[in-house]
Every structure is written in structure tokens, then in C-alpha cells.
Image (cartoon, rainbow, N blue to C red):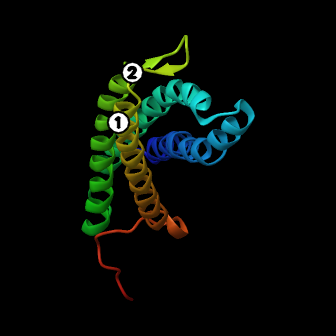
Amino acid sequence: MSQFATILIRITLLFAFAIWWGGFTFYAAIVVPVGSEILGSARTQGFITQVVTHWLNLAAALTILMMAVDSWLNRRTRKKVGFFIQLGATIASFICLAVLVYLHPSMDELIDFSGETISDEAKFYDLHRVYLWVSSVQWVLGAVWMAFIAIRFSDGKQISTKEPTHQ
């Protein structure tokens, strides 16, 4: 693969990661609390979050796909430990995404958007708790993946499996 193509793939991957992981971080840390305060309740903010999470999950899907492609393309240029940690974080992130996508419709069925009510609050909050935990695990996996990307590209060099030659 040409150096231009490699750089283009890396830049695209980093932009996708920034949109997904950074967007998720900003939304959870800033938008949800501010929205709850301005709208007057966490429940009202939750109706916005219900829609936003579809977009976050789509961004996650595209990013995780690109993470997998990056792992495959660079499988021979890294130390095996780093490769397996990044690949593991990618696969685990995909599993988390699959759980989130599975849970979302179950929660949606319990929501009446017109009346802003929840039909079975106990069931909804049990599902929501699992959703939040899985989202948190996925966020941590993203941080692990990002740490290994930072190590890989530190000082403009990729970590290689080849031993350095001394002259």
C-alpha cells in the first residue's frame, strides 16, 4: 500500500474515532447534564438522548469497522502484544455495540414519545442501567485502543516487531 493511502486511512480513522469517542465523551459529560438542567428534568433530556444514541451507535459502527481494517492492515508492523490488545479492544467494542443495538429497541418499546412517559419504568431502568454499563465499558475500550495508537505513532515511528540494528 502506498504511503499516501496509509496516511489517508489513518487520518480518516482518527477523524472517525474523534467523532465517535470524542462525541460520546462530550455528550455524556456536558450535553446531558446541561440539557437536563435547561429542560428541567433528566427524563426530558432522555428523550433527546434516545435519538442521539442512534447516531452515536452508527458512528461507533463505522469507527469500529475502520479500527478492524487498521488492525488488519498493520498486523505485521507492530509488536504482537500491542496488536492483540488493539484487536481485542476492537472486537470487544464491537460486542458492546451489538449489545447496545440489541437493547435499544427494547427500551424504545417502553417509551411513549407523545406523552413523554415510560410504560414500565422498572423494566426500562433495568435495561437502561445495563445500557449505561455496556456504554461505559465500550468507552474504556476506546481509551485503551487510543492509548495504543498513541504509543504506536509516538515520535512519528510505528512500534515494529523487528529488533533495532546497532551499528
Does residue 1 appear in the picture of this structure? no
Q: Residue at x 41, y 30 (%)?
A: 121
Q: Amino acid at mark 1?
A: Leu
97 lies left or right of 10: left
Q: Secondary structure at mark 2?
A: loop
**Occupied quadrant, residue 110:** top left
**Mark 2 sits on what residue?**
110
Vertical comparison of 160 with 146: above or below: below
* Picture coordinates of residue 142, whole percent (x, y): 43, 52
Considering depth in this image, is 91 or 156 the residue closer to the camera? Answer: 91
Q: Residue at x 38, y 25 (%)?
A: 120
Considering depth in this image, is 101 or 151 the residue closer to the camera? Answer: 101
Q: Secondary structure at mark 1?
A: helix
Say which mark, if any, is on residue 127: 1
**Occupied quadrant, residue 125:** top left
53 lies left or right of 108: right
Vertical comparison of 84 with 94: above or below: below
Q: Do the numbered discs 2 and 1 sit on residues whose CB atoms are within 8 Å?
A: yes
User: Which quadrant would the N terminus be assigned to in this image?
Assistant: top left
* Picture coordinates of residue 153, whole percent (x, y): 48, 63
Q: Residue furthest bottom?
A: 167
* Picture coordinates of residue 28, whole percent (x, y): 57, 44
Q: Residue at x 28, y 54 (%)?
A: 87
Q: Residue furthest top?
A: 114
Q: Amino acid at mark 2?
A: Leu
* Picture coordinates of residue 130, whole percent (x, y): 35, 43
Considering depth in this image, is 94 or 131 the residue closer to the camera? Answer: 131
User: Which quadrant would the C terminus be assigned to in this image?
Assistant: bottom left
Q: First in sequence, mark 2 or 1: give its number.
A: 2
Could you give the CA–CA distance between mark 2 and mark 1, rounded to whole angstroms? Answer: 10 Å
Q: Residue at x 51, y 68 (%)?
A: 154
**Occupied quadrant, residue 85:** bottom left
